[in-house]
Amino acid sequence: MTEENIAGIYTGNGWVASILYWNANGELETLDLEYDEAAEFIEAVEANPHQRKALALRVVTAHMEASEMDGSEGAKRSVVVDFEPQATINGRIVEVDPQGPTTFTVDEAEALKITGCAKLEAIESRTYASDGLKDARAAPRWIRQWSGPFDCDITLIEKDKAWTNTQEKES
């Protein structure tokens, strides 16, 4: 792959960026970056605007290599995590305002590693296993650093299908 494969670069509000590129089959694909990864990419592009395509090529290549290493083909399955920050006030746990974006996506391999589950269908919302997803690479920094109580609601994604696996948390 060369810089000529990079078809376009879109940088959003500092939390998202997209890179359009031509894959080996001549098909146009989009790589969406979120949160910290997007912020780092946007910062690098702003510091070196004449190297936009070279920087984009490095990011696309790194993502392609990571997909090859974990055996995935474009991350067919993943978990979307909706983080709910909470605080203890007068002995009661209450939901509080978030400090940034609260939703992020974790690929299948990382989700299984973090939760210790054998399959994605076994990961349930608002459980000890799903709580570990707050430390995923894709989680915004403020979530990874959150020290108070919280809940994680999850939605499982498989290609174009989505479903939730919710368990009511006991108080």
Image (tube, rainbow, N blue to C red):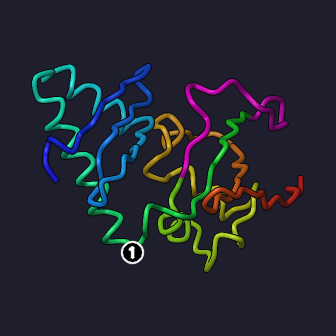
Give the residue at mark 1. Answer: 71
**Image coordinates for residue 6, horizontal then vertical, percent:** 23, 40
Q: Is residue 65 magenta?
A: no
Left or right: 67 with respect to 146? left
User: Residue 127 location in percent, x, y?
Assistant: 74, 60
Q: Quadrant of the N terminus?
A: bottom left
**Residue at the spot x=61%, y=80% of the render?**
118
Q: Which quadrant would residue 23 be assigned to in this image? A: bottom left
Residue 101, x across and y down, in percent: 57, 30
Vertical comparison of 3 with 40: above or below: below
Going by the picture, which residue comes out furthest to the front?
26
- How crowded pointer 1 is (Cα within 10 Å; few <14, some 14-19, many 20+) is rated as few
Say whether residue 97 is left or right of residue 136.
right
Q: Residue at x 69, y 49 (%)?
A: 152
The magenta stretch spans residue 92:
yes
Q: Which three-letter amino acid code belongs to the residue tagged 1?
A: Gly
Nearest to the observer: residue 90 or residue 163: 163
Residue at 13% from the left image edge and 48% from the top image edge: 2
Q: Position of residue 112 (x, y in %)?
A: 55, 70
Which range of residues does the magenta coloring cover? Answer: 88-105
Q: Is residue 142 above or below residue 154?
A: above
Question: Which type of secondary structure does the marked residue at label 1 adopt?
Answer: loop
Count the marks: 1
Residue at the spot x=70%, y=53% of the render?
Answer: 154
Q: Is residue 86 above or below residue 80?
A: above
